[in-house]
Image (cartoon, rainbow, N blue to C red):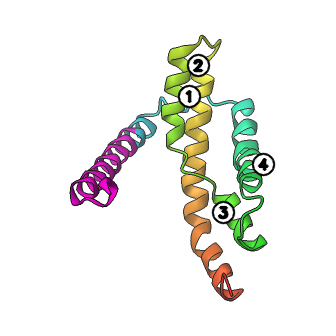
Amino acid sequence: MERAHSYHENLHTFAEQIERLVMMVLLVFFGAAIAEGSVFQALNWNVVVVAVLTIFVARPLCAWISLLGSSELPREKAVIAFFGIRGLGSFYYLAYALGQAQFDRPEDLWVTVCLVVVASVVLHGIAAAPAMRYLDREGPLRS
């Protein structure tokens, strides 16, 4: 019964607002770092290849596998798998990993994550409306 209590609902709403605020601040700082120019100084072809494989192979494949056994139609699974999960959490995961272990070239990890996030924002921003139109054209999602 505690979950249905108004205090719990208000606390949950507040936590979501704080999360959005922190995410907005992170995006502003990320944009400032990109504009400043130092974010992509370590960019090289290895980073680009890993980013492309992450966006077009690893992330969609993992998302598709995670949807096995779900009731979504194959076209829905394809769209969900392509768009994947929000990539901004990658900053938190990488920061945690770097705090727990030593890596030879952490700047390569940072630039890779930054490139994946920027490319995802651009690519998904461009593709979202056409993908939704495609799903709408194909008819009802469930019968």
Amino acid type assigned to the residue bearing label 1 in the image: Trp
Q: Which residue is mark 2?
A: 106
- The residue depicted at 78 percent of the width and 71 percent of the height is 74
Q: Are marks 1 and 4 in contact (CB under 8 Å)?
A: no
Amino acid type assigned to the residue bearing label 3 in the image: Ile
Real-space Cα separation, disc 2 to disc 3, in angstroms: 30 Å
Secondary structure mostly seen in magenta is helix
Mark 4 crowdedness (10 Å alpha carbons): few <14, some 14-19, many ≥20: some
Amino acid type assigned to the residue bearing label 2 in the image: Pro
Q: Are marks 2 and 1 in contact (CB under 8 Å)?
A: yes
User: Where in the figure is residue 101, as x and y percent of width and height?
Assistant: 58, 13
Q: Which residue is mark 4?
A: 57
The label nearer to you, 1 versus 4, is 4
- The residue depicted at 30 percent of the width and 48 percent of the height is 15
Real-space Cα separation, disc 2 to disc 1, in angstroms: 6 Å
Instruction: Give whichever of 34, 80 is nearer the camera.
Output: 80
Mark 1 crowdedness (10 Å alpha carbons): few <14, some 14-19, many ≥20: many
Mark 3 crowdedness (10 Å alpha carbons): few <14, some 14-19, many ≥20: some
User: Where in the figure is residue 30, as x and y percent of width and height?
Assistant: 42, 39
Earlier sequence position, callout 2 versus callout 3: 3
User: Where in the figure is residue 17, as x and y percent of width and height?
Assistant: 29, 53
- The residue depicted at 28 percent of the width and 58 percent of the height is 9
